[in-house]
Each structure stands twice: as structure tokens, then as C-alpha cells.
Image (cartoon, rainbow, N blue to C red):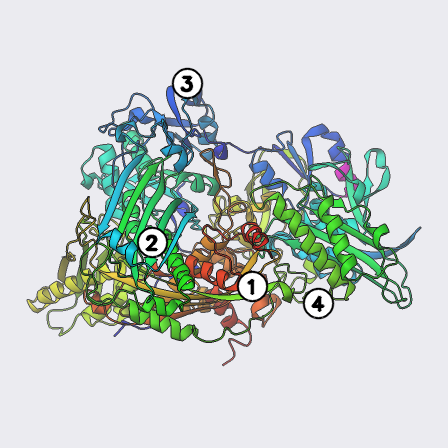
Amino acid sequence: MSLGDREVRRDAPVKVMGKAIYPGDIRSPDDLHAKVVFSGQVHAQMIAMDLTDAEAMPGVVTILTAADVPVNEYGLTMFDQPVMVGVGDRPRTGVDSTVSRWEGDHIALVVAESPEAALAAAEMIDVQWQQFPIVGDIDAALAPQAPLVHGEAGSNQYHHLKIRKGDMGVGWDQAAVVVESTYEFPHQEHAFLQPEAAVSHIDDSGRITVTVAGQWTAEDQEQIAHALDLPVEQVRVIYPAIGGAFGGREDVSLQIVLALASWRLRQGGEMRPVRCVWSREESIVGHHKRHRGRIRTRWGADFEGRITAVEADVLLDAGAYNYTSNKVLGNCHLAVAGPYVVPNARIDSSAIYTTTVPGGAFRGFGSPQGAFVAETQMNKLAEALGMDPVELRRRNIVREASVGITQTRLPDGVTMPEVLEACAEASGFGEKLADALPYSPVATLPAEPAALRRGRGLGCAMKNVGFSFGFPERCEARIVLHGSVGDPVPSSVELFHGGAEVGQGAHSAFLQMAATATGVPLDQVNGVFSDTATSGDSGSASASRLTWMAGNSIIGAAQEAEKAWRDGDRPAIGNFRFVPPPTEALDPETGAGQPNFSYGYVAQVVEVTVDVETGHIRVDRVVSTHDVGRSVNPSTIEGQVHGGVAQAHGYAMTEDLVVSEGRITNPTLSGYLMPGIGDVPISVEPVILELADPLGPWGVRGMAEMPTIPYVPAVVAAVHDATGVWFDEFPLTPSRVREAMIAAGY
Amino acid sequence: MHEVQRSGTQVSGYVSAESLEDAQRLLSEAGGAGRLIAGGTDLLIELARGKCSEVDLLIDLSGIGGLDGTELVEGVEGTELVLGPLMTHAQAAASPLVIEHALALAQACIEVGSPQIRNRATIVGNLITASPANDTISAAFVLDARLDILSSDGVRSQLPVTELYREFRQTNLGPTDVVCGIRLRVPAPESGARRASLFAKVGLRRSQAISVVHGAVAARFPADQGSVRDLRLSLGSVGPTVMMVPGVRDLVEGRELDEALIAEVAAVAASACSPIDDLRATARYRSDSVEVVVRRMLTALSQGREREMWRGDSPRLWGRVPNGHFATSGSIGDQTGPVEINVKVNGTEVVAQAGPGETLLSWLRGQEALTGTKEGCAEGECGACTVRLDGIAVVSCLVLARRVHGAEVVTIEGLAGAEGALSPLQASMTVCGGVQCGFCTPGFVVAADTLLAEVADPDEDQIRAGLAGNLCRCTGYEPIIEAVRSASESGSRP
């Protein structure tokens, strides 16, 4: 048995020795070096581009532009982005590919004999731009006569979702208390430690082969094939070690342009590999962020604390291109009503194009923003009613057979009540808050006890596991059982799987599941992963879905392989494509439908100490409670909790990406402050429940995003408990907190 | 092209100075194109960002021996504590003389950057970079520090630090002046009197934080209990240069530093500064913080609590190297273009080319194919490129490859146990869940290995202090702390 054991992850030994190979570590003496040239233009149309001087620079091999891209468009969910902005290309959609809509749009790829030569040539590219007005934020985009970021979309407000449930008139009539607020939330940068890097070459079978850090090999392969107008079989994508992702590698970065380079170079007889490594600044400028946005909302509840009405207007800043904004918006649209039974609701959610860095996938995928709003509204309702926040939730929380905000019964296995109760109990929520050690935000000075306030706050949330809204979910696995004809059981197992190991421990979890599914000891189970030449379509390492989906695919493949084994095949091969129950797009007018097949449930209690004179906040304790259905590896699960809380902590406290006039003004790790070892909460206590998901493999439930979702509102509630001040925006920087304390008379 | 993509300033020459006089001569000969480099933790970032485009020759002081110590000397005006021009922040914070006579400076030093940065960055460098956010300046102000300066033709002079700054990031040093040391007065002990200084910093993170406000205070409390004399108060990050708060000495001289007087001084300080809004805080917040911090500093000082938070056993990541002293390395003459350097890497002598502005990180990954050392930021923030130089942990992105000529470098590839087995620390990292994506892992392992060599049994505060220069985005750090604890002396005991 391996499932549930604290196995050491398979990749840990090579990683601690520095021997794991990431894309930027792949080198050969004959490498060519590429520079992806960003436009640096927030909103401007290219009039002309002159490569004469650049091409004459020493060491230049080729310079590729929009005109070299066979189908100059891409996008994970919509083809609304040119591979390169430029003139003389061949787009298929109506997107005007001569316009740079964001400072990180690509305009050229310079390939040269050295990185220095590529850069020097890139600096010699001469471009003439016609400046367009900057559409710097949501307000600018929605202003009358605002310039259109995408003419073909007809409006900057390009994607709109609705919920129309019950009767709002009745809901407000029944309300004894009403809480109305407008919330603002910032961008968040993924800041995975490994900036984007890739190598492209032509493999022995003549395939364009891109070795890169991504989240979904098959999707990268398709995107490349589409832009190059090639059959997918002529493209191969390989993931070596990946230095973190968190959603930030969901969309392509270097994949298409490097594949393009190899393909064009081969046409000229040049077969050398092409490599490219982004700097940290290029990484921060060049990939999407968690969406910033604004949500105005109004909630009503009766005297017993039962929610009577929820209305909300959600605006997410999608930035220059859609990326996954339409899907993130969908999640936020559901999350804004919280994990509660809401009889009457009106919710309108829109994604807005602006000429800023695109919004996209980031751990939680719209749910952290929605949960910030929903949970803060609940905590404000509790205050307005004079009711304990846990008790208020008990009276509203979704349970087995509850009808969700989309007017359909939630998938079976709703464990939100159990998670809430376990969190309340483990944290001692009903008891007096224990003393904490003195806190001084100024390291050399003793604490000022008179300035310290302590408080405690609660947040809870549910989020889908797996892709939503009718997307054709699937996951493929192949299992090969080795042994001799006379052997009663296999001697060893090989698993072929495409699922991406982005750091979360997926591959080791796959192997534990394969060992369990086949009954072969873990040390005889090996994997071949993340190479489109050998593994099938796994779907993405996202949406807390990978262990859940891969586990089901592995069970299926193991069953197929065992059948072949019983039939005498040696080796015995099992291929399986797992398909979960279908989901539905929401009704365009009412939002009715069954958007998801499984959910994860989380509750967190946070204890803080606030120095009201300096505005600094220390998080003393976090109790993070999760139903994981069934632990595949408890160490890995705890790692997800610690890491997810730390990311959420940065989001809540210090991570302040400043986007001004369309430009990121702090694209460095010295300017964008993620928490260090001295900044994270003093204590994080994972509380793990194992209440089986009826559809999960062995009952497994997705969990990796959950720790990031209710943390911000739990902190906000704790700060309110400590100081009496609500924060409707964050991060809770000392400046912001102190200004509010001054306003509150501290 | 985007501005973050533009190429940095490429220098064509690098020379290691044999002495300060030699450095002064080289600087004079180079005209405006020469630039002294010591720790390099500011300069290499500026060059990479294309600033100081006039610089074409780097004159490296950091290989000169004997310039990173402290000594007490008898001067005309009494006893002085002299700090060598190459004294690093880490060395100052560990120096018993500095801690005894200039606590504010020791406190300022340990609040700068991270252990790896403090192991290279010199105090003189922090002073002359002249950013109003530079922490040691406010401490040097209240300690009445003076700089020894060597000018052209061998002329030596002294300049009070309070007269060093002209405007934002501008000093009054001449283009060929070389700072040879820092002098702090050590007044003769006075029976029953107490002299005290204290530094304070408001930042947005515990480590690796640029000051939002910093300040220092020094004063004398004579034997006639209750009164205060010679109060000096400085503030930084609240104007174009670090400033002495005017008028406070006269305001408090001979009076009892009680709550009311402290509030008065705090109000004077807040009204004396002229902060601006920036990425880190609003001007209003800064003024408000000045009031709070000055009040807390004076309260602590008046109560004799200035040492209360001081931990003398904070790890420095020196491993077993005494005094954080880099071994004197081989020198390289003034040659343009790449030269061959001899370096002992992971115990093996290697000879390979290094360009004049090339970083150790780039050299290790490129020339030596030691790709375990990672680049995560190229500005000393993330610690993924941590290596040991002469036994001391540094960030290899902010060390020049040529600086390590004749030196010894240990990378992650050199840390495995016997026959390539995992070291106890590496093993505990795997068992405790200290590894997820693994990209930060080599830097953490090198830093933690150095920490354990220095402190066999670190407590949690020491582990956090020792690993403050390494960022991780996956684990939330707690499993890494657990791994270090379990690999430590008490953790590995059966």
C-alpha cells in the first residue's frame, strides 16, 4: 500500500543536490540564443519596422517578425492575441495585429550566436509607432468614448455573465439588515522562482521540439501547431523540472516563438538548438497576473441571520488580451456569493479589456477575489446582527443536496459544514483569544504594548475541482505491467502520464496512486512524464484537478492493464482516457446550469496582532482546514497548505504590483515584495479531513488552491476584530493600515 | 524594445588594486571612466541597469588585505574607534568594539539586506552610495562619524559624515577621492554616566527591506540621574538626504527625558522632515512614522533598553571562517577583455576565462556548467544563487567572477556527502518537505549548510535570521525550518 504514506517525493534528492534540470539549465556548445523583443508600447500602432541595422549586427542569424508567423494568433480560450505585433502578417481573426496593447507584446525574435549579440541586435530594431490613448484601468475602459482596446470585440466590456435567481424584491423585503460595500483588489504576480526559459530543437523524428516549463504539454503543443499551421504530430513539447507555476505558466510565453525559430531555421538548413531565458524583469512584465478589479455588492439577511438577497457587480481587469479571463470571471462570478444558500440573487460580472498586463490564471482562479467579497460581507453581516461569525455561517452554509447559486443541486459530497465545524473547534474560535508574544514591527525596539491589538477572523470557501462550464474535461494515462508469463503479479510498473510536475509533488503522487492501483510496491513503479511523444493529454496542472483527474485515469489504465495481464500479455498495457461527468455553460440570462462536477472545501481562522501606531500586522496563527477526501501523501498536502497560505499572506500584506499609465513600475523582486522567512505567519496549522469525494479516486478531493482562497478575508476580519476597522481593499500595507487607524482615531 | 530589456553598462576593464594608494592612482589615471568597487552589491545592480554609463574600468579594492578590521586609536581629540574601509555590515554587527561603543551602527548594519548581502556590502559603500534610505548613514550621523579620505597627490583629510551629502545620491567627495576608513569618537568613561545610541528602521518586510523610515539617536545621561545631554537625532528616507534633526539638542539639554519632552522632540522631528510619496509608503505615513519611531526610540533610550532586542548570536553565514574575513586572493592586472582566472571550485582547481564585468553566477553556470546555482532575480534578493566564497555565503549574482581569482568557491554541487550521498541536511530537506519546485533549493541548502557549520544547534529565530536572504514561493518556509532543525545537532541526535 502506498496511498496515504508519507513517501519522500521522487524528485527531491536530485533537487537538493542541484542536479535537477530546468529549461534554463539545458545547454549545448552549438546553441543559438534568442531575444524576444517586447514592444515597450502601452498602446500604439506599428507603422513600420526597419530591420536593416539590426540584421547587420555581428552574430545575428535571423530576426523573425509577425510576417514570419503562418497564423499570427493565439490564446488559451480565444484567439485574440497576435504571436507578434507587426505588419505584413496573416491573421485569421479580426484582431488587428499591428497594435501593441500592452508593454509586453512581442514584436520580434532575434536569433544570434550569443545572448549578447541577440540583445545588441534587438536594440537596433527601428520601429515607428503611432501612439494611441492609454486605457489604463477599468474606469478608463468604461468611460464614454473610451478607445477600444479590441475593435473586433466592439466594446471594452467584452464578456458578461449573469445570475438571476429568485425575486430580489422579496429578498430585500425580508432583510432585517443590509450590508453594502465596494471592494477593490490588486494584481498579484506569481513570482515563481524560475523565470521563463525554453530550448527548441528538431528531434530525431524531425519534430519541432520545445523543452519548456508549462502546465499542460498537449495544450502548448496545440497552440504551437495552430500558429505554425502544422499538424500537432509535427510538434513535440517536453517539460523538464519546472520552477513553480501557480497558474503563471498556464498561457504560453516562449513556446510559440521558439518553435517558430526552429521551424524557420530548419527551412534554411540551420538545425542548431535555440534557447532563451527571461530575466526576472522580463518575467514580471511578460506574463499575466491575478486579476485586479472592483466588486460592488449588497447583502441582506433576516433577524435569524438567514441570507435573503445578494446582489453584486463584478468587474475584472482582463488587461490587453483575454488569456483565461472569461473563465476566471466565471469562477469569481460564483465565488462572490460564497458557499451559502442564497434564495435571491442578482449578479452581473464583466471582464474589461484595458491596455495593461493581462489578467489570467493564478492559484484560486477568481475565487480569492470572490471570497474576499463574500466572506467580508458575511463578517460584516455578523457584526450588524451581533451574531457569532461561525453561527451565522451555520445558518446559511451549503450542505448535501443544497441548491447552489446556479440553481442546480451541488455535486454530492458537500462537506462545507464539517470543514467549518472542524476549523472552529481546532482554532478554539468560541474561546477567549490567547495571548501572543509581544510584537515589535521595528526589530531594534521593544514592543509598545499600548499600541498592540489582537484579533481573530474567519473565512471559508468552496471552489471547483476541474474545468468548468462545459469544457470537455479529460485525462489520459498509460500503464505498462512488466513480468514474465508465469508471474502471478507484475514485477514492475511503468506509468506514462502528461500531468505537469510544477513543484506540487504531482509525479510522486501519480506513482503512489499507480502503486496502489496495481498492487506493485512503490519502488518498482516508475514514471515517464510530460513529453507529448510518450504521454497523452492530461489536461492542465490547474484547477486543483490534477491528482483527482490523474488518479481516475491511473485507476482506469491499471484496470485495462490488468485485463491484458490476465489475458497473458507481457508486457501488459493499459490505456485509459478518463472523462468526468459533463458540466454546463451557464444560461446567459439566468446563470442556471451545472457548472462543476466536484468542489473543494476550506475554512481558515487567522489570529493577528496589529500595531495601530505603525500599521504593521503580524499573523500569529493560522488554522487552515481542508477536506482532502483522501490523502495520497500527507506531507505533500501539508506542503500545499503551508505554501498556499504563504502566497495568500503576500497577497494580503505586501505584494503590491503598481501599474501606472499601463506600465508596471516595480517589475523586480526588490520592488515587488513577496514574503520572506521572517514575514510569514508564526504558526500555520493544517487540519486535514478525509471525507471522501464520491467521484474522486479512492475518495481523493482536489485541494491545492484552497489554502489561498479565504485567507485575505480572514485576515481582514481579524484586523477588524482587533481594531474595529474594516478594510475593503488590500494589500494591508503599513501605510494603508495606519492611514485607516488615524481615521479611526488611533 | 522595452526598457527592462536594454543592455546594461559593459565595462571593458577590471583591475584589482594592491593598496588604497594604488587604487587612488588607478582612479586618477582612469579619468572619469574608473570606478572603485568593494562589495559591489549596489554597483553591479546599477551597471546591469545601464546606469553609470561613464564607467569602463572597475578598480577592485576587495582583495586588499587588512582593511576590514576595527581598532581603538588615540587621536588628538581622544580615543577613536576606526573601522577599515572594507569592513562589511556583517563584520561591524559582529564586532565587540562596535557593539560596545557604537550600538546604533551595529543595529543599522544588521538591518541592511540579508546575511549574504551583509557579507559583501561594506559600510563605506553604504555611506557613499548616498541614498537617503541607506541605513548606516543615520547611525553614522548620530555617532559623529568622520571619514578618512585619500585624495590626489597623497593628500589625506577628514570629513564629518554629516557634511558628506550634497543632494539626493550626491556626495561632496571628489571624483578621485578614496575613503580609507571611518572614525568614531569614543569619549573617556565618565563616572556614573551612561552613553547610549540606538537605531530604528520601519520597513515593509523583516529582511531585504528598503527603509520607509530609519533613524538613530545618541545621547549622554550624566550621573545626576534624570537629565540628558548631547542628544543627537537623525532621520532617513524622509527627504533627499539623511538629516540631523535640528534644534533637538538645545531643546532637551539638561532636562529630564520624560514622556512630555519625548513627545515634544517627536513632534519637532516629524515637522522637520520633508518626505515624498513613493512605491513603499505615502509622505503622510512617513511623517506619522517619524513621530512614532522617534517617540519609541527616545523612550527605549531613556529607560536604558537600547540593547533589549539585540541578539549577539544572530548567524552571519560565515560557516567556520573567523571574523567573516575573506582570504586575500590573487590579483589581476589591468587587462581589457576576458582573462583566465584560477579558482578552486568544489575542491578542484580550475582555470577558465572570465570577462571584466562577468558575474560569478554567470561564470559558474556558463564556464563551469555548474547549473545547480540558479538565477532568480540577478539583484541579490532571492538567494537562489547563494554559494560560499572563501567559506562565507554570498550571492554569486553580485560578485564579479574576476574577484574570485585565487579564491575558493563551493556551490551546491560541492555539498553532497561521501560518494555523492545526500548530506544530513539534504536528506532532511527531502524528508521534511523542504523541497517543492526545487528552484530555490540549492540556495537554501548552501545557506543552511553554512548556518549549521556556524551554529550547530540554531533555535528558530536563528534559522529565520540565517535564511532571511532566500526566497521560496512554494513551501511557506515552515518545512524548510523543520528540515534545518532536524539536521542540526539536537535534531539529529537519536
Residue ID for mark 3:
A52
The image quadrant where one finds the C terminus of chain A is bottom right
Q: CA distance from mark 1 to mark 3?
A: 54 Å
Q: Nearer the viewer, mark 4 or mark 3?
A: 4
Residue ID for mark 4:
B308
Q: Nearer the viewer, mark 2 or mark 1?
A: 2
Label 1: which secondary element: helix
Front position in the image: B197 or A179? A179
Q: Position of residue A284 (x, y in %)?
A: 44, 42
Q: CA distance from mark 2 to mark 1?
A: 32 Å
Front position in the image: B430 or A675? A675
Lateral position of residue A368 relative to residue A616, left or right: left
Q: CA distance from mark 2 to mark 3?
A: 49 Å
The residue carrying pointer 4 sits among few (fewer than 14), some (14 to 19) or many (20 or more) residues within 10 Å by Cα, namely few
Q: Nearer the viewer, mark 2 or mark 3?
A: 2
Residue ID for mark 2:
A367
Q: Nearer the viewer, mark 2 or mark 4?
A: 2
Q: CA distance from mark 2 to mark 4?
A: 44 Å
Q: Amino acid at mark 1?
A: Arg
The image quadrant where one finds the N terminus of chain A is bottom left
